[in-house]
Image (tube, rainbow, N blue to C red):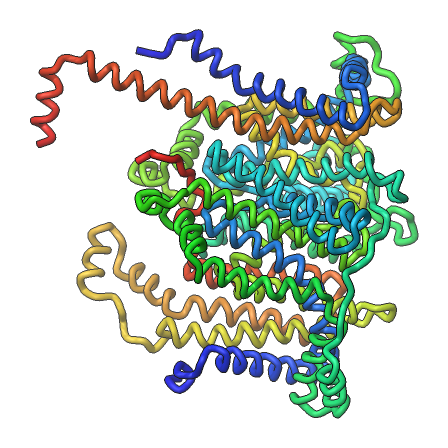
Amino acid sequence: MNTPLLRRVLLALAAPALAAAFALFVSSIVLALSGSSWIDTYSEMLSNASKLETMVDILNRATPLYIAGVAVAIGFKMNLFNIGVEGQYVLASFMAAWVGASVVLPGPLHVGLILLTAMVVGGAWAGLAGLLKVTRGVNEVIATIMLNFIAIGGIIAALLPRAIEDPTAANQGTAVIAESGWLPNLNGILELVTREITKGRRLSGMFLIAIILGVAYHVIVNRSRFGFDLRSSGMNPMAARAGGVPPKRMILVAMLASGAVAGLIGMPEILSDSHSYDQGFVRGLGFAGIAVALLGRNTAPGMAIAALLFGFLDTSSAPLQVTGTASPEIVVIMQATILLTAVIAYEVVNRIRQTDEVRRAAQATESADPAADVATAGASA
Amino acid sequence: MTAWKTLPAWARWAGIAAIGVFVLAVVQQVSGTTLLTSPNASGGMLRWSMPILLAGLGGLFSERVGVVNIGLEGMMILGTWCGAMGAFEFGPWGGLLCGLIGGALGGLLHAVATVQFGVDHIISGVAINILAPGLARFLSDRFFPQRGGSISQSPPVDGIGDFTVPVLSDAFAAVDDLDLFFISDVAGLLEGAVTDLRWFTLLGLLMVPFSAWLLFKTRIGLRMRICGENPKAGESLGVSIYGHKYLGVIISGAFAGLAGAFIVIELTGLYRGGQTNGRGFIALAALIFGNWRAGGVMAGAMLFGYPFAISLSDFDASGSGIATRALLLLVVVGLTAFAVYAYRRDGGLGAPASVTDAELSADLERGLTESYVRSVQGFARWGNSALAGGLAIIILAWYLLTERAADWVPNTMPYALVLIVLVFASQSLKMPAAIGQPFRKGET
């Protein structure tokens, strides 16, 4: 006996639809209050996004957001809150850029070395928090927050002067990586189905890697023994332990995996864009990744939609400013409102589902044969 | 030790403070600096720890009612914006009040999400941290340009002002000038505390005993704490759990807002985007360091404020770093003292075997070998002190091998110290029992 299919589908769609509608409603009010036309704002955002070049921008922006979402989601699956994705990816990007600039290797090897460095550094930094948790009982939220500050304010601040190529340059950073360490772009593949991409836009090769990562995440979490152990330890550590899953090892492995994926977040920048780490290196993707994971409910397709949505909103900000339609900050307000209403809506829908289930269980017991009840009562007595 | 325990609390605290200053005096003599006990050190520490203290007290109220508040940072940002707007329109006291209200609104949002709708506390906090900076920039764009500011900063605003305690300040200064070992050091630190003291700082310091009194000595405080310890028991006694949780989280936001207003009114003199600089997260660390108590939060806040104040005087134009290097020796002293304490507390190497036959046979039945059980027991007796001692030796080597500390050391040290403290104290910290757990009215 299941809830009617229609009701289940409606409930599943209700939360995101409610969140989107409410976010539009709130942003329209904010726009109206600040004296901008909400119709103009939305049509400007949509017409901008319908250009091919903007679509490439959106994909390029969504790529690191998606990787960040996956990194956070791996922790979430295990009930671990890796808030240190931010520090892990910045530290990993710095180290990878430094290593990448110090060597010249044949193409795939060079790129592979940079990716490997990033994953190892990110994994090690997250693994440190995992180690502190399993050996000393240090809460991973506080540990990773502290490690964020230590990575950015301490380690990078201490090492950057040694890695800087030209101390007199205006923007202090590592040397630009040799071209053998650049990831080829995907314009050729994209142009098979579209017109030629102009204005110097290039779809990062990391887009493909992010897709592969998403598929791997989906398969490993939902279809493998390891993923089952991960999810069961997250849902009920006691039961998982009784089933032979060592909780401490799972914590450590989950943190290592989360950090290794976090190391990839900065790679679109390092491998496809600036090819170096400098003081203006993109920040905040780790925290944005938390939002993507929450919106996408830690599922691979959900997070892809969330990353594309946030990518779309991020790229809408600049044209709004250029045309003077509205304050560019309206997109951040939209993002935060969507996030907050979505998590509330998910929670409300969850409660409705639970109530449904209780009602169904009650009906099932009532309609069952009374003799069965007597039998169970006798067995338990 | 028994005589120590019969002393009244104030005498014990004074004794601890005296020992602390004595260690400071010795360390700075050895390292060749006078900054550690200068008036600048104590005055700067009070000023720079105040935002962390206020936000940490905010965290205290929230976590005592059982709600994790990782959104302190966002509420603080709301406090900075509203504080600047209020201070520009109505003067500094108006800024203080507006900052408080702005933070409280953020707290209300967090309470609606977590208490009413049962959203995961950390998720709601993260959402507030994303919302607040965007909202502040949006509002700045709307309100500041026509007032002489811009999208990223407000027009300058006035501070509330300061005062100097008349006779004491001069007396301490005179004793400080005598250059007597220890006595002048004490006087120097006290001089910094009573000279040019901001009214806002004094208010913040008074909030510490006030919070402790409200939470631990009043009926409403007891009811708030039961929300964090055992809400079902509270509900069965007729306590309105939702109401008290709302109250605690809104007070929490108000404190975070005050912290933001302090930054604007007393530290920078204007609102600037990103000026909270992660202090909301640091406040959480101070809260945990302080074991969820008002006095402990203050100690944690000072732990962050002190090295920062030292580094401000230390890394001036000449960029010396000598006093900051002295702080390393201070850490070595602290770790060594802990290693000795832990060795005595945990038993140490020479202690008799504490594995009873019954425990041993139970462990053997679980499939563990005898040598493993004994080694775990042995490690429990000396592991903590060995770890602390090892860290002390590493930092001592760093101290001895360098002549001055790099400029990133003071920015990193407090975070590393909090991690070290958590490594040794995580098991003995006592957080509210029902923290972070969802509670629904009428559910059994």
- Figure check: B84 above or below B139: below
Q: At which x and y percent is residue B230? A: 36, 48
Q: Is residue A94 visible?
A: yes
Q: In the image, B374: left or right of A121?
A: left
Choose top left, top right, bottom left or bottom right for residue A366. Answer: top left
Residue at the spot 80% in from the left edge and 29% down from the top edge: A328
Count of labels in the image: 0
Q: Is residue B322 visible?
A: no
Residue at the spot 41% in from the left edge and 8% down from the top edge: A5
Nearer the observer, A285 or B155: B155
Nearer the observer, A381 or B315: A381
Q: At which x and y percent is residue A59? A: 72, 22
Choose top left, top right, bottom left or bottom right for residue A266. Answer: top right
- Figure check: A95 above or below B143: below
Residue at the spot 44% in from the left edge and 50% down from the top edge: B224
Q: In the image, A96: left or right of B347?
A: right
Nearer the observer, B12 or B306: B12
Choose top left, top right, bottom left or bottom right for residue B55. Answer: bottom right
